[in-house]
Amino acid sequence: MSVRRRTLLAALPALALVPSLRDARAEDMRLTPRAVGNPKAPVKVQEWFSLTCTHCAHFAETIFPQVKAELIDTGKIYYVYHDFPLDQIALLGAMVARSLPVDRYVPFVDSMLASQDRWAFARDVNPKHQIQMMAALAGISAAQFDRIDHDDSFRQAIVAQQDADQAKYNINGTPFFLFNDHPYNQELPDFATFKAEVDKAAG
């Protein structure tokens, strides 16, 4: 699991009315679920991840391809993504990803996690500029990127959902998984461990 969520929220503007946020979230398609696989699969796996979490990137690179090939594509699990940004840069990345068409969310997230060491942690790079360049390759213009970056209602909606999930599931690090209703909050070392959790959830 990654080192715990940082104090990214301290600088965020306060919301005046919580009910209005609920209404906005209900109407904003950017906040609808992002998932792959068959919704009728016997096991629903949910992952909470951060784009700047090295453990999340490791899972995406080394374990998830086998998960997709053997469990998602074969109809054994339905896989749901939840943004759980650990810092402001991850939050901006999540905002950009969710601003893309639904079918381009997962490819963009995969690309960001695969290149995390270059855009997030490389020496002498500006992560925000790197995200903007990746967004441009995905079809988001400079003007659109600027609007996303300055959309504080959208930013707060993601954070509010994150807070609700953290309180509900006691999420202390990423990646965090639910296999149906069974939480898994330890290090996930390999595909065999993942598959064992799926089998356990399937009963």
Image: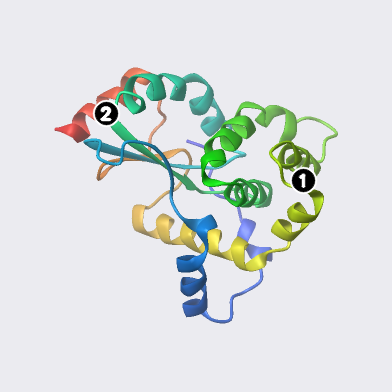
Q: CA distance from mark 2 to mark 1?
A: 37 Å
* Number of numbered markers: 2
Q: Residue furthest bottom?
A: 16
Task: Answer with mark 2 or mark 1, whichever residue precedes in sequence.
Answer: 2
Tell me the amino acid under the disc marked 1. Answer: Lys
Q: Could you say where residue 50 lies in the image, as x and y percent from the top left?
A: 55, 42
Badge 1: few (under 14), some or many (20 or more) residues near its Cα, within 10 Å?
A: some
Residue 76 badge: 2
Q: Residue at x 62, y 30 (%)?
A: 111
Tell me the amino acid under the disc marked 2. Answer: Lys
Q: Could you say where residue 27 lies in the image, as x and y percent from the top left?
A: 49, 67
Give the camera-side residue of 164 and 3.
164
Q: Could you say where residue 6 lies in the image, as x and y percent from the top left?
A: 60, 51
Badge 2: few (under 14), some or many (20 or more) residues near its Cα, within 10 Å?
A: many
The mark lying in front, picked from 2 and 1, is: 2
Here the colouring is rainbow
* SS for dot 1: helix
Q: Could you say where residue 83 lies in the image, as x and y percent from the top left?
A: 51, 48
Question: Is residue 33 toward the left or the right of residue 106 in the image?
Answer: left
Q: Image height check: is 90 above or below 187?
A: below
Which of the 4 quarters of the picture holds residue 107?
Answer: top right
Residue 128 badge: 1
* SS for dot 2: loop
Q: Residue at x 47, y 74 (%)?
A: 23
